[in-house]
Image (spheres, rainbow, N blue to C red):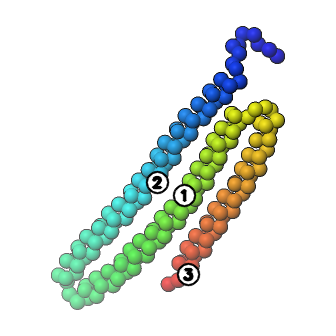
Amino acid sequence: MKNDNLPTVPPQAGRDIAEGSLARVREAYEHFAEAGEMALNAFETSMAQSFEGWRSVMGSSRETAHQLSDSNVAGARKTREQWEAAGARLYNAFEDNAGHTLAAMREIGHRMLVASDTNVRASLDFAERLAKAADAREVAALHVTFMQEQSRRLTDQMVDLHQTTSRLAREAAARTETP
């Protein structure tokens, strides 16, 4: 069906428009990826500050406990020492588990970001090759090649993510089994 109301666009002009659009999309994606990395860093900094704040609160509670128990008799001193030991064990266990959990979250998040970045860049490269295609036969060949590569890429990424999460789960289980 031909529509005579539409202006004709020479093939080279269409390619030029497509390539220009792809360049702008790639530039926008670079800004997006940079913003994502900044957000991840901000999250890590915020979590570190939260743990530092918690650590200082625990320290002030310990000081208060020292002052109160020093004014009491020997029985209170023994209770204080037991409380301090239990509190220290609890705090150390919490801090250790939180550190391991954050490290695991960071590793999984990093792998997910790398995988999505790889997929977006592959799609942009594919779009550029498509814009430069000479005819429908080349477009079809590009589609087949891209789908095969993307399928292999996604499979590799899922295997990597599965292996990473399995390893991290085994490490967490080993830590909980160890006294």
Query: Which residue appears farthest toward the top when viewing the image?
Result: 5
Q: Residue at x 63, y 28 (%)?
A: 16
- Determine which residue is flagged by label 2: 40
The answer to whether marks 1 and 2 mark residues whose Cβ atoms lie closer than 8 Å is yes
Q: CA distance from mark 3 to mark 2?
A: 31 Å
Q: Are marks 3 and 1 in contact (CB under 8 Å)?
A: no
Q: Which residue is mark 3?
A: 177
| Marks 3, 2: nearer the viewer | 2
Q: Earlier in the sequence, mark 3 or mark 2?
A: 2
Q: Which residue is mark 1?
A: 109
Give, as a three-letter code, the residue at label 3: Glu
Percent position of residue 47, x then y: 40, 60
Mark 1 element type: helix
Circles 3 and 2 in contact, beta carbons < 8 Å: no
Q: Is residue 120 above or below residue 69?
A: above
Q: Residue at x 43, y 55 (%)?
A: 41
Mark 3 / mark 1, whichever is N-terminal: 1
> For the residue carrying disc 3, how many other residues have a C-alpha within 10 Å: few (<14), some (14-19), or many (20+)?
few
Which amino acid does the dot numbered 1 rest on?
A: Gly
Q: Is residue 60 left or right of residue 5?
A: left
